[in-house]
Structures are given as structure tokens and as C-alpha cells.
Image: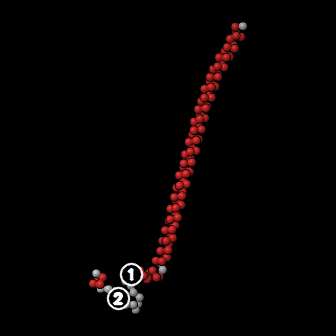
């Protein structure tokens, strides 16, 4: 009979030990879960900030592209003008002093320039 009285006590001791281990394991699982949730929340918030920053960068770059397209258009018009016969003739007359055949060039004297 002494043996039968001891078995339930051992069983209760084992249950207490198992219960403590279970509580420790559950506590560890809770801590890991909380850390994981914090990681997810922080990652989500950082992702939102990064997306906002990228949207601002995209808007800025679009504005820059638009202004560069305007400058490019103006430069293309300038190139078209410079390649035109009228512009070539004007530059030849002003920069190189060339004249058409039969034209007479009248140059102001040095005294008049001063």
C-alpha cells in the first residue's frame, strides 16, 4: 500500500514539473511572437516611409524630365534655325564679313566707332 500512495505523489510532482516547463515554453513562445509582431510592424512602417520617399523622388524626376524636354525642344528649334540658309547667311555676313557678289560694303571709320 505504501507503493500505491507514492505513485500519485510522483505523478503530481511530474505534473508540476511539466506544468512549469509548459508555462516557460508558453512564455518563450509569447516573447518570440511579440518580437516577430514588432519586427513586422517596424518593417511595415519603414516600408511606408520608403514608398513616400520614392513617390517624392518620382515627382521630382518627372518635373526635371519635363523641364529638360522643354530645353531640348528649344535647342532643336535653335539647331533648325542655325541650319537654315537665312541664319547661315546672317552669320557669314556678321562674323566673317562676307558679301554677295555685286554688293558694296560700307564700313564706318575708326573715328566714328570711338
- Horizontal side of residue 113 vs 63, given as left or right: left
- Residue 6, which numbered label? none
Q: Quadrant of the C terminus?
A: bottom left
Label 1 or label 2, whichever comes before in sequence order? 1
Numbered-mark total: 2
Question: Residue at left 70%, top 10%?
Answer: 5
Dividing the picture into quarters, in which one does residue 110 lie?
A: bottom left
- Real-space Cα separation, disc 1 to disc 2, in angstroms: 13 Å
Tag 2 residue: 106
As helix, strand or loop, the secondary structure at mark 2 comes to loop
- Reply above or below: 13 against 70: above
Q: Position of residue 1 (x, y in %)?
A: 72, 7
As helix, strand or loop, the secondary structure at mark 1 comes to helix
Q: Position of residue 38 (x, y in %)?
A: 57, 38
- Residue 94, which numbered label? 1
Dividing the picture into quarters, in which one does residue 4 lie?
A: top right
Dividing the picture into quarters, in which one does residue 22 lie?
A: top right
Callout 1 touching callout 2 (CB < 8 Å): no
Residue lying at the far left of the rendered structure: 111
- Horizontal side of residue 13 vs 62, given as left or right: right
- Horizontal side of residue 54 vs 91, given as left or right: right
Q: Position of residue 21 (x, y in %)?
A: 62, 24
Question: Residue at left 54%, top 49%?
Answer: 50
Nearer to us in this view, 110 or 12? 110
- Reply above or below: 22 against 104: above
Question: Residue at left 53%, top 61%?
Answer: 62
Nearer to us in this view, 112 or 40? 112
Crowd tier of the residue under label 2, counting other residues whose Cα lies within 10 Å: few below 14, some 14–19, many 20 or above: few
Q: Position of residue 113 (x, y in %)?
A: 30, 82
Question: Residue at left 65%, top 17%?
Answer: 13
Amino acid at each position: 500500500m505504501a507503493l500505491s500512495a507514492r505513485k500519485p505523489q510522483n505523478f503530481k510532482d511530474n505534473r508540476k514539473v511539466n506544468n512549469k516547463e509548459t508555462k516557460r515554453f508558453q512564455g518563450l513562445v509569447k516573447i518570440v511572437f511579440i518580437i516577430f509582431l514588432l519586427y513586422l510592424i517596424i518593417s511595415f512602417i519603414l516600408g511606408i516611409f520608403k514608398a513616400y520617399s520614392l513617390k517624392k523622388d518620382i515627382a521630382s524626376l518627372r518635373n526635371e524630365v519635363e523641364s529638360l524636354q522643354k530645353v531640348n525642344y528649344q535647342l532643336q528649334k535653335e539647331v533648325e534655325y542655325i541650319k537654315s540658309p537665312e541664319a547661315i547667311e546672317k552669320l557669314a555676313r556678321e562674323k566673317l564679313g562676307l558679301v554677295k557678289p555685286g554688293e558694296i560694303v560700307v564700313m564706318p571709320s575708326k573715328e566714328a566707332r570711338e
